[in-house]
Image (cartoon, helix red, strand yellow):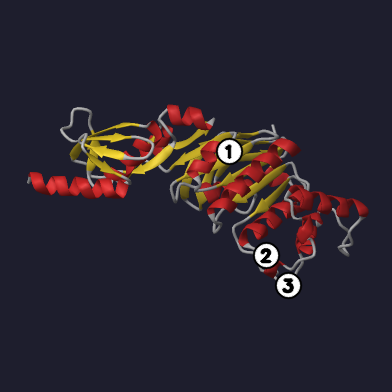
Amino acid sequence: MLVTTENLSIGYRNYIVQSNLNLVVENGDLICMLGTNGCGKSTLLRTLAGLQPSLAGKVLLQGQSLDDLSSQQKAKLFALVLTDPVEAKNMTVYDVIALGRYPYSSWLGNLSDEDKQYIQLALQQVKLQHKAFSRISELSDGERQRIMIARALAQDTPLILLDEPTAHLDLPNRVDTMLLLRRLAHETGKAVVLSTHELDLALQTADRLWLMSPQKGMYCGLPEDLVLSGAFQEVFASQSFFFNPANGNFSVSYDTYKPVHVYGDKMRVYWTVRALARFGYCGEEKADTSVEVSADKWVLNQSKVCSSIEELSHELSLLEFKTK
C-alpha cells in the first residue's frame, strides 16, 4: 500500500474533526474527497502532507510513519498542490516547473540532464510544451493550474495531493483538469488524492471516493456503490435540494402543487418537467392537464400547440387563470 492511516484523528488542538480513520491509497488511484464545508477535507489533506499534526493515530507512507520522515524524504514521496494562486508572475513556465526538482538538485540549484528530462516530460504530460518560456502572467487560470500540476509531476513522487484543484476555473477547464488528473494517475501509476466540491465530476472521474460527513465519519468506496448505498443522500441531506440516485444529479426542491401529465419524447420530457417544476407543476399521470412532447412541439390538452417550453409555460398560466 502506498498510503495507509491507522485510527487517525484529525483536527485542531482539542477539537476533533474526524476520528478513527483507516484509509488506504494504492498506486494509480484517483481519489476524490467530498463533503460539506467544515467536514475536514482540507484538514485531512494537510495532515496527510504533514502540514499539521494528527491528534491521534498514524499516517504511513510506504510503510514508514510520516512523523519519522525528514523533509527531504517527504519531498520524494509526495507532491502538494494548494489552491493559492501563483505569485511568481515574472517567472517562466519552465522555471516554475523546475522548482519541482528541488529535492534532487544540488544546493546551488543547478539542473542536471535528468532534471531537464523530467521537466520536459511534465510539460508534455500537461500539453504545455508550446508555453514553456511564456511568463506566468501571460497565461489563463486553467493554464496556471496545469503548470502547478506539472511542477508536482516534475517532482516525480508516487503520491500527489491537491486541495481543490478546480477552484476558480470555468467549466471547460474544470472538466479538463479532472480528466487530466485521471489520465495521469492511470498512465503514470501515481496516486492522486484531491479535495473538491465538484460532485458531478468526481462521480464520473474518481476511482474511489472519500465521502466525509461531520456527524457520521467517512464513507469510502466506488462512486456508484456510495450512490446506491444512500451515502450521498445522507451526507448532503437538505430541505433545499435532493440527490437523485437515478441520474447522479442534485436538484432543487421546489414547492410543486399543480399536477400536469407530461409524456412523449423521453429527453424533451425530462427538460420540460424540470422547467415546469420552477413554476410549481409536478408530474402526475392522472392529472386533468396534459402536455404531449414531440421532437418539435408541445401540445397542451391535445389542442394548443406550443413551439417552446417558454410558450408552454405561458399557456399554462393562462389556463390556470381561466379556471380560477
Density class for disc 2 (Cα within 10 Å; few <14, some 14-19, many ≥20) is some
Q: Report, in whole angstroms, how far the alpha carbon at label 2 lies from the one at label 1.
A: 26 Å
Q: Is residue 239 visible?
A: no
- Give the camera-side residue of 78 and 290: 290
Name the amino acid type tagged 3. Answer: Asn
Name the amino acid type tagged 2. Answer: Leu
Checking the image for residue 139, the label placed there is 2
Residue farthest along the right direction in this orientation = 113
Q: Determine which residue is flagged by label 1.
A: 205
Q: Determine which residue is flagged by label 3.
A: 90
Looking at the image, is mark 2 or mark 3 earlier in the sequence? 3
Image position, residue 240 (x, y; %): 30, 46
Residue farthest along the bottom direction in this orientation = 90
Position above or below: 77 against 144 = above
Q: Report, in whole angstroms, how far the alpha carbon at label 3 lies from the one at label 1.
A: 34 Å
Q: Report, in whole angstroms, how far the alpha carbon at label 2 lies from the one at label 3.
A: 11 Å
> Do the numbered discs 2 and 1 sit on residues whose CB atoms are within 8 Å?
no
